[in-house]
Image (cartoon, rainbow, N blue to C red):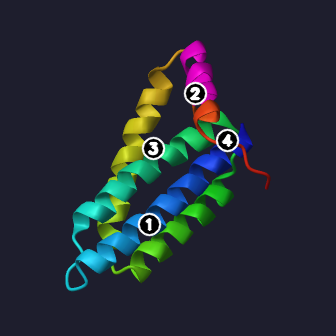
Amino acid sequence: MIRSALSLIAVFAVAASSLTATAQSESAKSPGPDMASQLGKISGMMHVTAKSCGDYSAERLAEIKERQRAQLAKAGLNVESFEKAFAESEKQATKRWQAMSAEEKKAACQKMKQQLPVTAE
């Protein structure tokens, strides 16, 4: 399951790179907070999922988040908007995970594993 979580985070990193490149080319003067907020929402949810589905350390998740922040800053996106959306999404996703039964959690993790290719570390 850790590899699934890694794949999920890797997919986000690729998506974030693509989206930030697109945002940069579309609006070099004033990249909007909407893109950063959307990425923050996705990232917050994915971090909770990665942590919940595997033995993902807080340190590793912090490293991943810091790389995401650096990519956003490099692309000229609003890192504060990312942080705000990340925190809200993380809080909401945590509540959802807490409300899920063990079977629902297992099914959610299996679904994530099936949807993403497993990558070697």
Residue that label 2 marks: 111
Disc 3 or 1, which lies upstream in sequence?
1
Badge 1 amino acid: Ser
Mark carried by residue 4: 4
Disc 3 crowd rating (10 Å Cα; few below 14, some 14-19, many 20+) is some
Badge 3 amino acid: Met
Q: Position of residue 72 (x, y in %)?
A: 41, 73
Cα separation, mark 2 vs mark 4, equals 10 Å
Disc 4 or 3, which lies upstream in sequence?
4
Cα separation, mark 4 vs mark 1, equals 21 Å
Q: Say left or right for 85 vs 56.
A: left
Rendered position, 49 above or below 73: above
Check disc 1 and report its element: helix, strand or loop. Answer: helix
Cα separation, mark 4 vs mark 3, equals 15 Å
Type of secondary structure dominating the magenta stretch = helix
Q: Which circle, 2 or 1, is nearer the viewer? A: 1
Which residue is drawn at the image coordinates 62% and 65% (left, top)?
Answer: 63
